[in-house]
Image (tube, grey):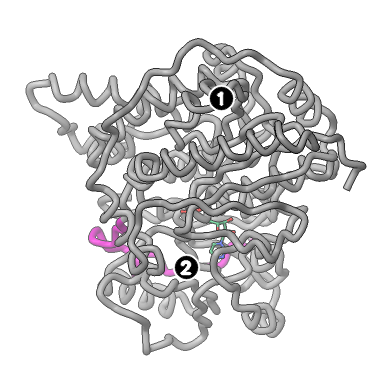
């Protein structure tokens, strides 16, 4: 770490693995530039403080009961929290006074990264793509499900405790006169923090864990949905048109856009509007898992539309062990298992930290993998299969783990392909390691990420069925 610069940054990640990882990558970058780090976090999905002895961790209440907070069934928790929505939203007042802290932050983020950045597109590895027996995986019912309302609900239940915590921090800063809190950096999904930061005269930077294209593009969805409701025939489009490009949101196809619009998203519409407003009112926007090379056009668009400084400083994951911010304990035995496999033969299967599937879907994937006749490493989280605690039958040629050290798996010479839900972190990690993907996007931004993979960068294939 550089000598301390006397400034402290307060971070507030959304309690979801895919949002926690990028936040800790950002923490590490800022810490390496001399900033002290305080992480405010919910009780639900608490990050492991012991992995970060140099940071200060402050837990806040999140409104969940003991039983709810201790469950590993994220979907269940999110569904419970779904009951409260966006009520009580307060419009942000004009921008807060800029103070020295954010300027220092801007400099830290603008300066060359402390680590060499590298992206390798896996075009030269396409021939090494393992042969999957696709027909065996074709099943229109194979649709993982996930609740989309987590962040909206959590925002409401955390507001008062977060305000108290931040206010106390600022008070102790004044009393002790030791360190200046330069700014708050939190996830774009926290919609109450902008107003709060302004009222405390603290600058707020927004971290987006989406691909820039999705972050910028998804604000059009509420308008599209309204227009669609006005159409006499509602949503339906002819089969022949389904594969056509969706001009309103490239590179999605019409069928992808319909799937996104069909999600139960009236709540998400007003949520998106709030994210737009609060981001525009912020002091800056940071994308830690993207860069100019991956998102040049969208970054140009973002800089036009948001009149705040925008930093795309990633991908930075490969310089930090993913396990350090992992909510689950990675099963390291899969690396020894991979060591015994031949080069580029193993198909790695993971649907990230939130997507759930049914038992039927699980069986369908099992058969597909078995019939592919390739060795496979498959992450089946506890509670991931609806209605089943754990799976007994492990198909031959495969290894099943509850959580994998994903970055190490993707780096491993034996890994030849990735059957993925296309969460943005997983997508970037795979692109950076040159591992081709079989895309099984489930919801929301995953559909866009998957289109980039298959149609724009051509580093993967969509698993085709009536729905995909
Ligand atoms: N991950 C992991 N081990 C696993 C599965 C996932 O370490 O067995 C990590 C993965 O490397 C990624 C994150 O969890 O950084 C998942 O984020 P992503 O955006 O891909 O999906 P989400 O969980 O948000 O749907």
* In this rendering, position of residue 400 left or right of residue 175: left
Residue pictured at 50% horizontal, 45% vertical: 454
Kindly identify which residue carries mark 2.
132
Question: In terms of sequence position, does the residue under pointer 2 or pointer 1 come before the other?
Answer: 2
| Number of the front mark, 2 or 1 | 1
Q: Quadrant of the rendered structure where residue 27 is?
A: top right
Residue at screen point 33% across, 27% down: 89
Percent across and percent down for residue 258 are 26, 36
- In this rendering, the answer to whether 225 lies above or below 380 is above
Vertically, is 145 above or below 103?
below
> Looking at mark 1, is its residue's CB closer than 8 Å to ligand 1?
no
Q: Residue furthest front?
A: 175
- Magenta stretch: includes residue 137: yes
Which element type, helix, strand or loop, lies under badge 2? loop
- Depth check: 219 or 415 in front? 219
Q: Is residue 397 magenta?
A: no
Q: Is residue 352 visible?
A: no
Q: Which residues are magenta?
A: 128-145
Label 2 Cα crowd, 10 Å radius (few <14 / some 14-19 / many 20+): some
| Coordinates of residue 4 in the picture (x, y in percent) | 87, 40
State which image quarter holds ligand 1. bottom right
Counting from the top left corner in percent of width and height, residue 35 is at 79, 39
Number of other residues with Cα within 10 Å of mark 1, as a class: few under 14, some 14 to 19, many 20 or more: some
Residue at image point 71% right, 18% down: 99
Viewer-proximal residue, 74 or 231? 74
Tell me which secondary structure the magenta stretch mostly adopts.
loop
Mark sitting on residue 200: 1
Q: Secondary structure at mark 1?
A: loop
Task: Say whether residue 48 is visible.
Answer: yes
């Amino acid at each position: 770490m550089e000598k301390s610069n006397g400034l402290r940054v307060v971070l507030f990640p959304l309690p979801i693995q895919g949002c926690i990882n990028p936040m800790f990558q950002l923490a590490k970058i800022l810490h390496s530039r001399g900033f002290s780090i305080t992480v405010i976090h919910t009780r639900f999905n608490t990050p492991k403080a012991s992995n970060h002895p140099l940071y200060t961790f402050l837990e806040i209440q999140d409104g969940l009961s003991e039983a709810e907070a201790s469950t590993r069934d994220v979907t269940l928790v999110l569904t419970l929290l779904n009951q409260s929505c966006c009520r009580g939203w307060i419009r942000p007042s004009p921008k807060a006074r800029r103070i020295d802290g954010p300027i220092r932050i801007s400099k830290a983020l603008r300066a060359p990264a402390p680590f060499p950045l590298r992206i390798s597109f896996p075009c030269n590895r396409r021939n090494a793509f393992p042969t999957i027996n696709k027909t065996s995986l074709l099943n229109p019912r194979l649709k993982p499900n996930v609740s989309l309302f987590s962040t909206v609900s959590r925002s409401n239940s955390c507001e008062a405790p977060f305000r108290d915590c931040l206010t106390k921090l600022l008070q102790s800063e004044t009393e002790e006169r030791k360190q200046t809190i330069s700014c708050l950096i939190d996830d774009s999904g926290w919609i109450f923090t902008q107003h709060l930061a302004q009222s405390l005269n603290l600058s707020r930077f927004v971290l987006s864990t989406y691909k820039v294209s999705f972050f910028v593009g998804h604000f059009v969805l509420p308008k599209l949905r309204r227009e669609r409701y006005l159409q006499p025939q509602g949503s339906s489009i002819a089969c022949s048109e389904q594969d056509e490009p969706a001009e309103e949101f490239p590179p999605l196809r019409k069928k992808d856009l319909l799937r996104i619009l069909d999600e139960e998203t009236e709540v998400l519409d007003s949520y998106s509007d709030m994210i737009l407003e609060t981001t525009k009112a912020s002091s800056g926007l940071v994308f830690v898992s993207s860069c100019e090379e991956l998102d040049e056009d969208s970054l140009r668009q973002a800089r036009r539309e948001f009149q705040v400084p925008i930093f795309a400083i990633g991908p930075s994951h490969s310089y930090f062990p993913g396990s350090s911010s992992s909510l689950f304990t990675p099963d390291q035995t899969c690396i020894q298992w991979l060591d015994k496999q031949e080069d580029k033969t193993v198909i790695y299967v993971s649907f990230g930290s939130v997507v759930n599937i049914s038992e039927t879907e699980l069986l369908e994937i099992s058969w597909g993998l078995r019939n592919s006749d390739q060795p496979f490493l498959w992450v089946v989280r506890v509670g991931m299969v609806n209605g089943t605690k754990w799976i007994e039958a492990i198909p031959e040629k495969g290894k099943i783990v509850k959580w994998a050290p994903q970055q190490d798996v993707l780096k491993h010479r034996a890994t030849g392909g990735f059957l993925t839900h296309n969460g943005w972190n997983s997508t970037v990690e795979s692109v950076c390691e040159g591992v081709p993907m079989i895309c099984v996007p489930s919801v929301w931004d995953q559909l866009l990420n998957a289109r980039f993979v298959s149609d724009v960068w051509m580093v993967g294939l969509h698993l085709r069925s009536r729905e995909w």
